Image (cartoon, rainbow, N blue to C red):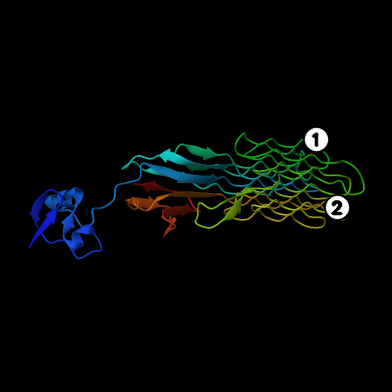
Amino acid sequence: MSRRYKGAIISATPPTTSSSAASGEWTLRQQMQAIAGTGWPAPASAPPTVEYLVVAGGGAGGGRSGGGGGAGGYRTATGLSVTAGSAITVTVGGGGSANQPPSNGSNSVFGSITSTGGGAGGSAKASPRTPGQNGGSGGGANYDQASSFGTGTSGQGSNGGSATNGSPNYGAGGGGGFSAAGGNGTSTVAGNGGNGTSSSISGASANYAGGGGGGTYGGGGTKGSGGTGGGGDGSISSTGQDGTANSGGGGGGGAGNPDYDGGNGGSGVVIIRYADTYALASSTTGSPTVTTTGGYRIYTWTASGSITF
């Protein structure tokens, strides 16, 4: 059965689909597909660019009226060029450990994009005592090194907060978050963690990169609250709260007298998306979650791997 397309006649019978060919009229592209013997419709090409969100692991909170951990670095943008056939490395950074001395979070990477791990909170339990560390966002100061907070990385996060070496409760500083610096501790109140920010790249709004709250000394006062985006709360009487997994949140600072560790930092995450008019990736590693919704193909890694288009 002959079918007509715009400008000529071609002798072929397309599958019955809801397309112009199904009604008997072929576009020039459809005619060329039929001549080439390709499937119907033709497979879409690899995307030329992707949108990305790369969040590093959060820093651990400090011990003994310790500072809150800084959030992992947060980077997001559209229009990142990708090359078909070339594997792109994906690294998901782990959260920092609260074992003394507390450690920074690890970097997260997507190809040429690197987000810096969050800075650990200052610790008065470590020997020697450690100040708040620099990172994606900086860690808060411990009570005994009151002005020694960590600084954040430009474009990725904020500074940690200072502390107060003053009775009765010696409040530590909060860890920095993406959107705000960590709060400063006072003699009775520990600093709150700086807030993170929200993203809908996954298809639903979620918060990332919040700093951890500071701890207090002496079993009293007011603990610092973790920032929105996975920051852990500090404590007045126990171990600091861990940052939320796959948020890049900083760990909360631990209490002093008796002396407690801070919380561990939350692990990071890597998410990319592109229009669903383009084909699925030819291969992936690291077992990303793959969804198609809202006109996008979305890949979410919570473990390191790779992707090839």
Residue 96 placement (x, y as % from top left): 63, 47
Mark 2 surroundings within 10 Å by alpha-carbon count, few (fewer than 14), some (14 through 19), many (20 or more)? some
Residue drawn at (18%, 63%) of the image? 15
Q: Of the residues under marks 2 and 1, which one precedes in the sequence?
A: 1
Q: Nearer the viewer, residue 74 or 143?
A: 74
Residue drawn at (61%, 44%) of the image? 72
Question: Disc 2 marks which residue?
Answer: 257
Label 2: which secondary element: loop
**Label 2 to label 1, Cα distance in Å?**
21 Å
Q: Which marked residue is nearer to the observer: mark 2 or mark 1?
A: 1
Q: Amino acid at mark 2?
A: Asn
Checking the image for residue 147, the label placed there is 1
Q: Nearer the viewer, residue 117 or 297?
A: 297
Q: Amino acid at mark 1?
A: Ser
Checking the image for residue 284, the label placed there is none
Residue drawn at (75%, 53%) of the image? 225
Q: Which image quadrant: the N terminus?
A: bottom left
Residue 275 placement (x, y as % from top left): 39, 50
Vertical order, 259 against 104 (above or below): below
Q: Are marks 2 and 1 in contact (CB under 8 Å)?
A: no
Left or right relative to 119: residue 93 = left
User: Quarter of the image holding residue 238?
Assistant: bottom right
Residue 182 placement (x, y as % from top left): 73, 43
Left or right relative to 37: residue 188 = right
Label 1: which secondary element: loop
